[in-house]
Image (cartoon, rainbow, N blue to C red):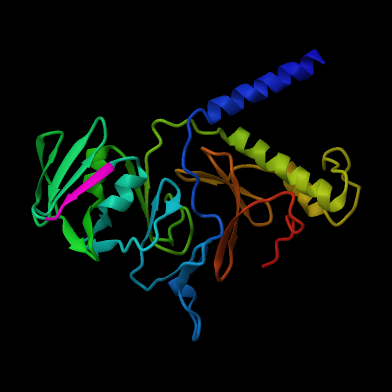
Amino acid sequence: MKKILIAILISLCITTSAFAKDIVSSNLDGITITPINDTSEGVKTKITYKDGYVENIDANYVALFVNGSLIRDSNVIIEENRALVPVRAVTENLGYEVKWTEETGEVEIYNDKTNINLKIGSKTATVNNEKAEIDAAPKIYNNFTYVPVRFLADSLNFKVDYCDGKNLETTHIVPRIPQIIVSSYDSYDALSKDEAVEIVKKQLIEAYNLTYGEYIPWDENETYKNNGDDIRKAIYNLNVTEENDRFYTIPVVFDFWVDKYTGEVYVFYNGMTMVIYKFDPTSKGALTFAG
């Protein structure tokens, strides 16, 4: 009994450390993406969000992820190899306030530590009252202010990654589409890879027990045969193969993603249409991975 209590206390300590501060969950649950390179006659290239909203995309589409969430209708602009992004969509999702003064065309971005002032059409800005130059002037597009993402990253000290969707050696969240990944997690504690593996293992075992009966570890009985043998083998061989700013990737049949900051588990299916959904070990079809 004493050993059990100690184990519970250790588990509680790990959980408290990993999730010491609140963070907004990713919005990727229920998203489907049909990339441009998979089009055929009659097939629309689009992104469908869980709430049913459909965003049509074209050959110029560049996805914008901010702290693991896909920003809908971000309309990233690429000009002379610079990426311009909507100020409000990026900064508000990182916890900053934005004030727009229409009469002067000025934008103020601020929190309790940082203050940035921009003016539409001007390459001169101020960052904490210090003059700063922008390599492309802020502009209005679709009633939103756009500025180079690199200027925001340098001024607000967040990280920016770019992937063309093809070179998957570079940091990416999904394959096959160009993407900009903006991230800032300085005030949050991340799960370790081992903790992520344990989360997936626990959920897979729960799903296995509900689907096939009592789980028997593969290394304890390799001769036991039932329809869940592939899952038993996968559980035995779980490991992190990739990671990005927000997720660890753990291959099972499809890829399982573990949110480093919430512990939530997602399933990613890389078919003609890419599908992302939260894993529910108690659902009837939890271990059905049909393509």
Q: Is residue 184 left or right of residue 214?
A: left
* Picture layout, residue 248 above or below residue 7: below
Rendering coords of residue 133 (x, y %): 10, 45
Q: Residue at x 14, y 47 (%)?
A: 118
Closer-to-camera residue (247/176): 247
Instruction: Let me know if residue 109 is in the magenta part.
Output: no
Q: Is residue 89 left or right of residue 41?
A: left
Closer-to-camera residue (262/98): 98
Q: Quadrant of residue 165?
A: bottom left
- Toward the bottom, the furthest residue is 41
Rendering coords of residue 50 (x, y %): 53, 61
* Picture layout, residue 209 above or below residue 177: above
Q: Residue at x 75, y 59 (%)?
A: 285
* Picture layout, residue 241 above or below residue 29: above
Q: Is residue 278 left or right of residue 222?
A: left
Rendering coords of residue 193 (x, y %): 58, 36
- Assign the magenta stretch its main secondary structure: strand
Quadrant of the image for the N terminus? top right
Rendering coords of residue 258 (x, y %): 58, 44
Q: Which residues are magenta?
A: 97-102
Q: Residue at x 66, y 68 (%)?
A: 291
Q: Residue at x 46, y 71 (%)?
A: 46
**Numbered label tally:** 0
- Toward the right, the furthest residue is 224
- Toward the top, the furthest residue is 2
* Picture layout, residue 80 above or below residue 221: below
